[in-house]
Amino acid sequence: MMVCQQCLKRQASVHVTQILNNEKKEIHLCEQCASENEKKAMEKSLYLATPFSINDLLIGLLGKEQGYSVQQTERTTRPVCKNCNMTYEQFIRSGKFGCANCYNTFMGVLPSVFKKIHGNVRHHGKLPYRSGEKIKTKREIIELKTQLNRAVQSEEYEKAAVLRDRMRALEGQLKEEI
């Protein structure tokens, strides 16, 4: 059982290991101390040396390799929220918006941030293991119908015929599975 390095009372449940220049540094905190340090870091909006912020940890893991570091030339071109005066750099550092208007302010840069964090901009949802293939096929049929309608509207009849044939083949697969 590890004891919290800050309060020296409660059991440590948050463990962070940092390796910098081949030097290993471990921090062990209880949930309460970790939460307090997070609140202090957010209030002061600066990095704490020994106690850590979860956001700082994530930025440290994803930051420089994933493009979160803001260069000096970019700071002037990044938007600033007119309501709460939050800058892009503050948003990236904290990982949280300052107000409801921040979403609209940073909307132009959010897709690239989401893509770097999640690997994709669009959420596709989880699929059940057993019926996942059937759901994928149904989604593909819906997408093919949309493409077919566009092809017909733009008078691309050869493309439409190919899409129609693909759609029929998938529908036939679904009927066979039933």
Image (spheres, rainbow, N blue to C red):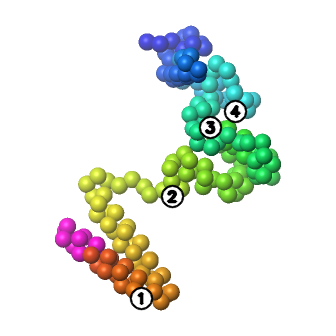
The residue carrying pointer 2 sits among few (fewer than 14), some (14 to 19) or many (20 or more) residues within 10 Å by Cα, namely few
Could you say where residue 118 lies in the image, as x and y percent from the top left?
51, 48
Q: Which residue is mark 4?
A: 42
Q: How far is mark 1 from mark 4, CA to CA?
A: 58 Å
Look at the numbered discs 1 and 3 and tell me whether their residues touch, using CB distance below 8 Å.
Answer: no
Q: Which residue is mark 3?
A: 64
Q: How far is mark 1 from mark 2, CA to CA?
A: 30 Å
Vertical position of residue 153 compared to residue 85: above or below: below
Q: Amino acid at mark 2?
A: Arg
Look at the numbered discs 4 and 2 and tell me whether their residues touch, using CB distance below 8 Å.
Answer: no
Could you say where residue 92 lies in the image, as x and y percent from the top left?
67, 42
Of callouts 3 and 2, the N-terminal one: 3
Extent of the magenta region: 170-178
Q: Residue 22 bears which disc, if any?
A: none
Q: Which residue is mark 1?
A: 157
Label tally:
4
Question: Does the image show residue 117?
Answer: yes
